[in-house]
Image: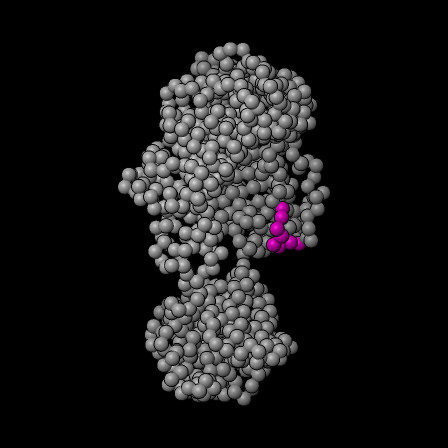
Amino acid sequence: MSTNPGDWSQLLVNKVVFITGAAGHIAKSIAKTCYIHGARLVLGDLDPIKVNKVKEEIITNENNTDDRIFVVKLDATNETTIQQAVQATLEKWNTIHVLLNTAAIVTLGNIEEISGEDWSHIFDVNVRGYALTAKHIAPIMKKQNSGSIVNISSTLGLIAIPNSTPYSATKGAIIQLTRNLALDLGSFNIRVNTISPGSIDSPGRTQLAKDNNMTIEEMNKKCMEGSCLKRIGQAQDIANLIVFVISDLCPFMTGANLVVDGARSSDESTLYTCFESLSSELLYEILEYIDVYDIHKSFSNLNNRLQNLITSSSLLLRIKLELESKSLPEYLCQHVIIPNSHRIRSLHLTNQLSVDTFFNHCTIDSTFHRLESIILNGIEAEKLPTTLFDLKSLPRLFSLTIFIKDNYYHDRGDIYPFIFSLPTLIYNRLYSSCHTLQINIPHVINQQFSTIEHLVINHCCTLNELNSLLQHTPQLRHLSCDQMFKSDEEFKEDLSMKLPHLKYIYFQDFDASFDEFEEFIKAISSQLQIFSISILRKKTYLDGDRWERLIKEYMPQLKKFYFHFDQYFDGNNEQINLSDSTNEFINQFSSPFWIERKLFREIQVYSRVSTFSIHSYRKKWIDRHEHMNNDTYSKQSLIEDNCISNQEKTDHRMIQLTIGNNEYTTLDRPYIERLKSVVKAIQFTHLDIDNDGMSIKMLLDILSSLPNIKSLKLSSLPRFPLESLSIEDVKNRLPVSAINKITKVKLGQVTEKQQIQFFINLCPHIEYLGVDCMSDTDVPFLMKIIMNRRTHIPNLCYLCFINPIADDNMVRTLAKIIDSEIVIDNYTIQRSGKKISVHWTL
């Protein structure tokens, strides 16, 4: 129903409102107010006399009639009466739009005075009754995909007062019951909220005052002491709020607890609103993620307890200095860092000013005995030896990262000995942008080896220099090197020991000769499991047989292999160079050795460079079974593994062509013609286009040269509109074989129906279709288009929508669209996060 905001008397017109405990004082006001706003009332209560009296009070007004009021007998502790009341309502009005749980009893007293029967009874009425009523009404709301449930709790479910343990326990349980129901029913557009009244004027308050040896005036005065509004609440205050919450004016509120108490429960003396009331354990967890300066600035002056907490030695500190001026450093060092040096776990100096400031005021010595990690960004090379010497006093320094400021020539041979002498270091990274660097390091003396297990060398280095470094790291497990250059002298195979723990090597921008590299691999170890190398220019590395021998003999335990070769071509013979290099790469790495190890070949083509890659298999979108999990809607009990045919398993002979997107790549006609001339002799099986400059005609030109393409991925769709390109044009431009072999398609940034229609017509034998949608894409509309053209793509057995706002409502909507078609009935639809997957068993 769409409510006219100007017609306030019709907020609940024709809504069926089911009220439990309807004879109660607050419930009576709620019923009257809902009736005024047009609701049809179901008044449920255990006392038929009192509830009929409520009905009579409502219809006393000459304009009111009883045709919108239905009285039912309901005992909140008896599930049978709840079922009967719900059924009688359905027989009369065929639905229920709103459930208001107001039934409640009050049990007070000291814990030792409350009997087991009293505990059972109050929970039966106040909690179990709410749950059972929701149990029998929720299915009705689910069926109509809408509804609102409001549970009446109390501020005593939030705060504690003397002698109220049973009552407060039930009211707290109601608040949590509401949160869970909101979570479970939200996907069906059912909202569940709690209203927690404070002190409400009612006939029962007089007796409550007597029980506490007070007059009603005295009790009201006491209740008003902590209230901002300085008055006692009225039942009408609650009724007015409920009308708003259950109306169409409030469609986005669920799981909320609305406190109506004149702000009395926000008094600073109550526990649940005060930051300082959090436990020390929880505060420790919070402060663990905050930099020490922010802790000191924000919390140190709050109170003595937090001051003591901050200065506690059990709270370890993280320091990250990001100084942009010299105004704070002295204060930080004198008042934060130096007094807390024994508690500092990590130190990150983010720029040269931070580094200079820190070392001008502080010295790292044995007082930093809990320091485990240091990052120095912008330190001068001349200052490093002294700093590294001081670090030897740290008993727990496990990680050290250094970014050297200087760009001019410097011998790093005086730095690494200090690094290797650090007694507990596990991780080390040294970065320098200097391209004229030398490392002259002596051989190991007196068996003084480093404890380093993970070494990252982010500066230029030769294999001989690397060789000399590795003599000091017998515990090394992970090696990463950038800018590996050719040695000026012959490689020296003088490693005095193997590296038995080395499992991972990563070489980036590798420019040493293959001969040097081969000698290095032979010298280190046969324990390698992961090896990655990126080659610059040297075509001698495009020797598949040589790689095969090297891996078999010296890397027998290799599990993952990553090879990247960048081929640059000149302007005069670029087409010939690209063609020759491409054919050479494919031919060299086509033996059974590469196929059996599931190593894939990929070619990325740009305007001035091509990248040839070999890599271990990584799960891709074409492995459609990876999305089939987390059932939310199903016409099958489960999906068996054999529902994915052998044809759908990944073909490890796949050769992928990637057309990338960078600033040097322009998709113009010369580029397309050059690309076509190069790739026509290679049986590419997968085409990945990640370039938003692609047009439809360019795509068709490329596909016409790739007759063996089986899967097609476009990160962004070709330029539309398509009015100038008919389906007949498509068929004329593409060989029939190409159309028949494209079985898997993934489309990115789909927004229009024409885009889906074009690719359905382009690929009539499609089996997998992945559609990456924008947040404003009409997914149900796209599903209707696909289902309407289902006969044109009879082999489609897997459909995946990726949508940022995917939810269970969208799943049910798509399922209804599929159900409306009788083409194929045996399917499963499910959602995992933002992915909605449909699988048909053909």
Is-magenta flag for residue 359?
Answer: no
x then y, percent, for residue 299: 37, 54
Residue located at (48% from left, 67% from top): 193
Q: Nearer the viewer, residue 423 or 64?
A: 423
Q: Is residue 333 left or right of residue 547?
A: left
Q: In which quarter of the image is residue 3?
A: bottom left
Q: Residue at x 51, y 25 (%)?
A: 481
Range of residues picked out in magenta: 628-635
Q: Is residue 202 above or below residue 427?
A: below
Relative to residue 747, is residue 595 depicted above or below?
above
Residue in view at x 53 percent, y 78 percent? 110
Q: Relative to residue 282, is residue 739 depicted above or below?
A: above
In the image, taking residue 273 as reference, residue 108 lies left or right, namely right
Residue 453 on image: x %, y %: 56, 31
Instruction: Please give the name of the residue rendered at 55% of the width and 25% of the height, measured from the top-left corner.
Output: 448
Q: Determine the image quadrant of residue 217.
A: bottom left
121 or 546: nearer the viewer: 121
- Position of residue 355 measured from the top left corner of the image (x, y, whole percent): 36, 34
- Viewer-proximal residue, 278 or 768? 278
Q: Does the magenta stretch include residue 631?
A: yes
